[in-house]
Amino acid sequence: MKREARILPEIVVVGSLNLDLVARVPRRPLPGETVLGSALEQHPGGKGANQAVAAARLGARVAMVGAVGADGFGDALLASLRRDGVETRWVERRAGSGTGVALITVDDQAENSIIVIPGANGLVDPEQVARATPAIRAARVMLLQLEIPLPAVMAAARLGREHGLTVLLDPAPAPPPDRPLPPELLALADYVTPNESEAAALTGLPVNPDDPRPVAEALLRRGARRALIKLGARGAYLLGPEGEFRHPGFRVDAVDTTAAGDAFAGGLAAALHRGMPAGEALTWGCAAGALAATRPGAQEAMPMRDEFEGFLRERSASP
């Protein structure tokens, strides 16, 4: 068995680890309807773990902070992270809870619907985050999502700010209207990176993909330092102190968009930890997301560094 890495991370991810159970269906069922599927697959996932693998495969040293159950699912998720070189010493085993599970349906148009059962992810707390201070202090970039309890996310963001990290907040899953994200959390993040539905949930405004600036401006008014709106196949839009950036996205034959947003986050983080300017980092995020959508699964779909760099060279050389 491959020995667990012991590294000083460049990127630290504080978030979820899930086992993904993926059902392939011709179309997603309507309420009360039964649809026959063609396959059931099992993949390592969780937004946090996916983003950790995405960044690691692009050459960054990455540490994961989170929790799994003392069960076979937890064993599988830790082994998957270690295979990609992710430091797992700050992933704690919780004997009283099962490992998180995501139930995912993917249709013939590569669109997905997801139900998450948090399990041990729901037990991550500020005290555990504090125990991971050595990883946070060593890193340059922090990735956060909302699949662990909000107090833990807040604690991580505060520690990230205290130690001078670039903090990326992926506000997914979107918070319900009766529990909006505190402005303090948005203000602690250097980049807030919702997709269209999450941006609408955060601001109460619909996103016009042809002109997302009004929604980005609304996020800045709520406290975000930079608002980055992911637009799926249309690319992404970024508004912040450096100015306004728009990437049209890369055309690919999509197979499964389940982890495209997580790949985007990993690509963005990998670029920022290298010191790339915001516009170039946006390109890296779009490229990683596009490549991940061309294959099934979550962590398995994340592009390797050689493939990613070849993709960028090829697309930059295209007329």
Image: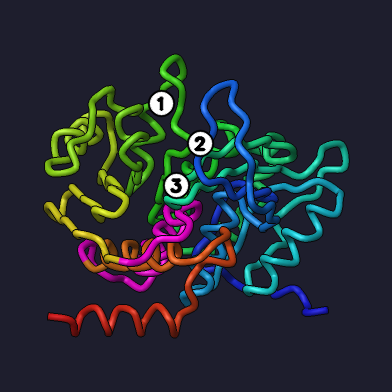
Q: Which residue is mark 1?
A: 182
**Residue sitting nearer the eye, 138 or 147:** 147
Q: Earlier in the sequence, mark 3 or mark 2?
A: 3
Q: Amino acid at mark 2?
A: Met
Residues at discs 2 and 1 in contact (Cβ within 8 Å): yes
Lower sequence index among marks 3 and 1: 3
Give the residue drawn at x 49%, y 55%: 259
- Residue drawn at x 46%, y 22% is 176
Residue 154 badge: 2
Q: Along the horizontal axis of the image, is 117 left or right of 181?
A: right
User: The C terminus is located in which quarter?
Assistant: bottom left
- For label 3, the residue is 111
Which of disc 1 and disc 2 is earlier in sequence? 2
The stretch in magenta equals: 252-279
Q: Secondary structure at mark 1?
A: loop
**Location of residue 61 in the rendering, given as x and y in whole percent from the top left corner:** 54, 73
The amino acid type of the residue labelled 1 equals Pro
Indicate left or right for 200 with 317 as reference.
Answer: right
Q: Amino acid at mark 3?
A: Glu
- Contact, CB < 8 Å: mark 3 with mark 1? no
